[in-house]
Amino acid sequence: MGKTVESLDIDVNDVSATLFVTLYCHALESQSKNPILNDPMSVELVQRLNGKLYHSDQVLYKRLVRGRLDKKLIVHIAIRAKKYDQYVRDFLKHSPEGVIVNIGCGMDTRFWRIDNGRTSFYDLDLPEVISIKKKLITENERYHFIGCDVLDHDWMSVLDRHGRGPYLFIAEGVFMYLRQRDVKSLVLKLQSQFPGSELVCEVFNQVWLRKPLLKKMMDFKMKKELHLGPGATFHFGISSSEAMETWNPGIQFLDDWSYFDTDEEKLGWLRLFRRFELFRKTQWTVHYKLN
Ligand SMILES: C[S@@+](CC[C@H](N)C(=O)[O-])C[C@H]1O[C@@H](n2cnc3c(N)ncnc32)[C@H](O)[C@@H]1O
């Protein structure tokens, strides 16, 4: 790190603006008492971004700089990041030289939290996001950026060129913003291009998306609490953890995880939600093998 941020162009679309929310959640939680997540690099990043974001005309950014984020949201995002770190560590236990692709990485600094000295790690996000990240963080021989729309499948050739594996694709807080047909064609493409790979991704429950009133309430909440733009809305959902198995033979459901499954004390009474399947699976994570 240590590059200058004065020339940084932080003009990103409504969905990408959410990456600053998760970054600030990581940093705030890391500085709290008994942190769920230890992410010193996120703290350094926000210190460098604060001035730039504060002087932007976006209410969201000004609020982030002032630390005005719902405590529950900070805890949720930190729990999620910690769990995705664990998915990666578990994968690297059996495949220490495995390749990790962090789809829709935002400003996340997972590589430095999980690095085992042998893995290769790709941070993939839209070109404008990667151009911000490049100004803040430097690539190295095992850490690379891919500045590309994940739906433009050409990015996969970068991995092909290196010709290694096995692969773990992770998508934390990303797929719900994409369209159903796009997520499906991406997953099928990953399956055909990288047979034997694993996919860990966060999904949303279709039930909530199919009820227009509920969807409106959700969108209202996101706009009101976070001051996100209208483009930051969910489109993709599934009905059960096994749903993607029906997309193609060979897609194999391995396990799932919900925020409420964790025993983190900071989650408090919300842990009770684990007993109610509809709440447990409002927004949750699924893990598949793509055979
Ligand atoms: C909520 S943020 C999550 C960032 C990061 N995964 C984290 O947990 O901190 C969503 C991210 O998805 C990225 N994204 C959305 N659509 C994308 C696309 N079509 N291709 C690549 N990245 C995308 C956004 O730019 C943004 O960085």
Image: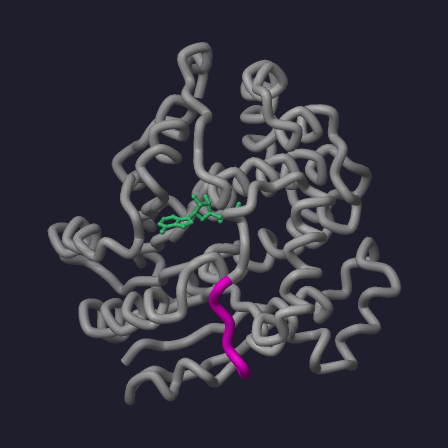
Task: Give me the residue at 65% from left, 71% from top.
Answer: 282
For the C terminus, give its image quadrant: bottom left
Q: What's drawn in magenta, residue-wise? A: 235-240
Apparent side of residue 270 relative to residue 77 in the rendered image (left or right): right
Q: Relative to residue 286, is residue 43 depicted above or below? A: above
Residue lying farthest to the left in this orientation:
161
Task: Give me the residue at 78% from left, 51% from top.
Answer: 72
For the N terminus, give its image quadrant: top left
Q: Relative to residue 211, is residue 71 depicted above or below? A: above
Does residue 184 appear in the picture of this structure? Answer: yes
Residue 227 location, quadrant? top right
Give the image location of residue 219, x and y in percent.
64, 55
Q: Nearer the viewer, residue 172 or 165?
A: 172
Q: Relative to residue 30, is residue 66 depicted above or below? A: above
Residue 188 location, quadrant? bottom left
Q: Relative to residue 9, is residue 283 depicted above or below? A: below
Give the image location of residue 220, x and y in percent.
69, 53
Look at the image and say whether residue 188 sits in the magenta stretch: no
Look at the image and say whether residue 236 sits in the magenta stretch: yes
Does residue 112 appear in the picture of this structure? Answer: no
Residue 245 location, quadrant? bottom left
Give the image location of residue 112, x and y in percent.
47, 39
Task: Give me the residue at 52% from left, 41% from top.
Answer: 19
Apparent side of residue 120 relative to residue 177 in the rendered image (left or right): left
**How is colour applied across the structure in the image?**
one colour
Q: How many marks?
A: 0
Q: Nearer the viewer, residue 54 or 107?
A: 54
Task: Give me the residue at 19% from left, 53% from top.
Answer: 159
Q: Main secondary structure of the magenta part?
A: loop
